[in-house]
Image: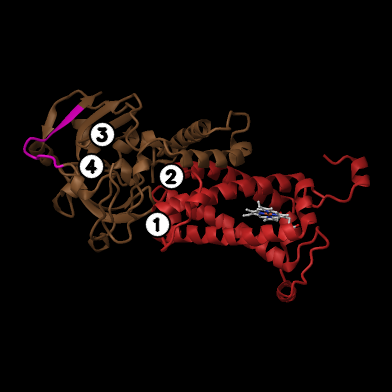
Chain colours: A red, B brown
Amino acid sequence: MTSAVAANRKPKVIHPLWVRITHWLNALAMIVMIGSGWQIYNASPIFGFTFPRSITLGGWLAGGIMWHFAAMWLLVVNGLVYLTLGIISGRFRRKLFPIRTHELARDIGDALRFRLTHDDLSVYNAVQRLLYLGVILAGVVIVLSGLSIWKPIQLQELTALFGGYESARVVHFLAMAAIAGFLAVHVLLALIVPKSLRAMITGR
Amino acid sequence: MARIRKAVPGVDPKLLVKDAAKLLPDPARRAFLRGGMSLGALAFLAGCDIVDGPSAESALSKISFFNDRVQAWIFGLNRLAPTYPESAITRPFPFNAYYTEDEAPEVEGDTYKLKVGGLVQEKKSWPLSELYALPQEKQITRHVCVEGWSAIGSWTGARLSDFLQRIGADTKAKYVNFICAEGYSTSIDMPTALHPQTQMTFRFADEILPRAYGYPMKIRIPTKLGFKNPKYVTEMYVTNDYPGGYWEDQGYNWFSGL
Ligand code: HEM
């Protein structure tokens, strides 16, 4: 991708191609998983509410399940690629660590006063680090809890780890809520700082 | 088809709604598939003709068949469903079908005969008295519904694998197909049919199977979702031709293993 000439002419790559591809594939997979997951949830709500039909995917239960168990392959394969490359390339270590409490306290304070900046796109502030790490963790939890409700017999040890079928279902739902909450904030921030969005598309 | 009434608190009544029974007749449903499709196109269906509902559905069906193969591969013949103490049994155990409880079939026990056919040596029909004479065992296992809820029940009956041996079934065949009194049907893979916990059930909670739970005979398969556990079973066939099933033909994943 980056020839020596191009590298000289253009600013440094902030997000390498693999980050951009896996990021957008993940966004797609997550949205399909969440929309179809809401459809499945509506068939037997855990809590006293259902999701409006218009924001669910699949039209009815079987359609929702079909979407869910199709998009899961994309989510898992893409997620494994992202995690593997993130670890071996050192990106996670460089970009997401360390998270220091005093920096976090300062950045949260700034954020609450709408003073937190993201001028240097190549460095994540402490709040970003925490959120990204948190959502990656939520992604791992949602996949593991999903596996344990999909295969509570073949993977019964995993299901037991979540406290059994019924509580694994609740964990799966809470992980979805965490990711959906992250997504709302994340998309808003990307729109507030459009150059960060551009960087996640073009790499720079 | 009738709407399901709330049978048990905590069990959702709306699930198997009327329109769910037909394959994409609902324009809204089709539109959702289509809307989702333009989004999903890039990711998993690049290159196919994916602009309209039917092709979205056919692509999704292909993935569902792929998922059947994956699940058959994951399935362990000796992987047992966890069992529970009597105290864990869910009371009352939910009734669930695409009709209400008072519309459930009423099968006459005295004249009932289980018809057995297909790739079996002994193609006779079995009256209840002979079925009850088969060696039986009890299991207290979790029933998991495709809708997401689960309940623990106690089922007593004969191992399907014993019965298949006894009637000289070709256990190399691919499928066992079940037909029920009300016209319901489902089919399972042979490995699941031979699983030690797959049962021809005659009793629920130590009582003769009540009408609501499938009198006179249900097939209890703790390693599969609830809709793969047929009630009011009147016919059983061993076959190599994919038989599908009532819900499976409408889009539920065929293997639906747990
Ligand atoms: C469609 C909606 C989405 C948009 C518009 C979006 C946008 C962005 C942007 C602009 C960045 C760069 C942020 C920066 O420079 O600080 C980013 C990074 C990131 N996003 Fe998203 N995103 C979306 C969906 C998601 C979803 C669904 C997830 C996870 C569940 C996610 C997880 C992440 C993570 C972990 C990073 C950091 C990646 C890294 O540096 O390796 N995003 N996103």
Q: Is residue A177 visible?
A: yes
Cβ atoms at labels 3 and 1 below 8 Å apart? no
Q: Amino acid at mark 1?
A: Tyr
Numbered disc 3: what chain? B
Distance, label 3 to label 1, CA atoms, is: 28 Å
Q: Provide the residue designation for mark 3.
A: B178
Marks 3/4: CA distance?
9 Å
Residue furthest to the front: B27
Checking the image for residue B231, the label placed there is 4
> In which chain is the residue bearing label 4?
B
Q: Nearer the viewer, mark 2 or mark 4?
A: 2
Mark 3: secondary structure? strand
Which residue is pictured at 93% across the width and 45% down the height? A9
Q: Is the same chain shared between marks 3 and 2?
A: no
Q: Residue at x 47, y 41 (%)?
A: B29
SS of the residue at dot 2?
Answer: loop
- Give left or right: position of A68 versus B94: right
What is the span of residues highlighted in magenta in the rendered image? B106-116
Work out whether residue B163 or residue B61 is closer to the camera in this orientation and state it: B61
Q: Is residue A204 above or below residue B121?
A: below
Q: Of the two numbered discs 2 and 1 on the same chain, state the one appearing first in sequence.
A: 2
How many marks are shown on the rendered structure? Answer: 4
Q: Is residue A155 visible?
A: no
Q: Residues within 10 Å of mark 2 (few under 14, many from 20)?
A: many
* x and y, in percent, of residue B121 in the image: 20, 23
Q: Secondary structure at mark 4?
A: loop
Amino acid type, mark 3:
Phe
Q: Which mark is residue A165?
A: 1
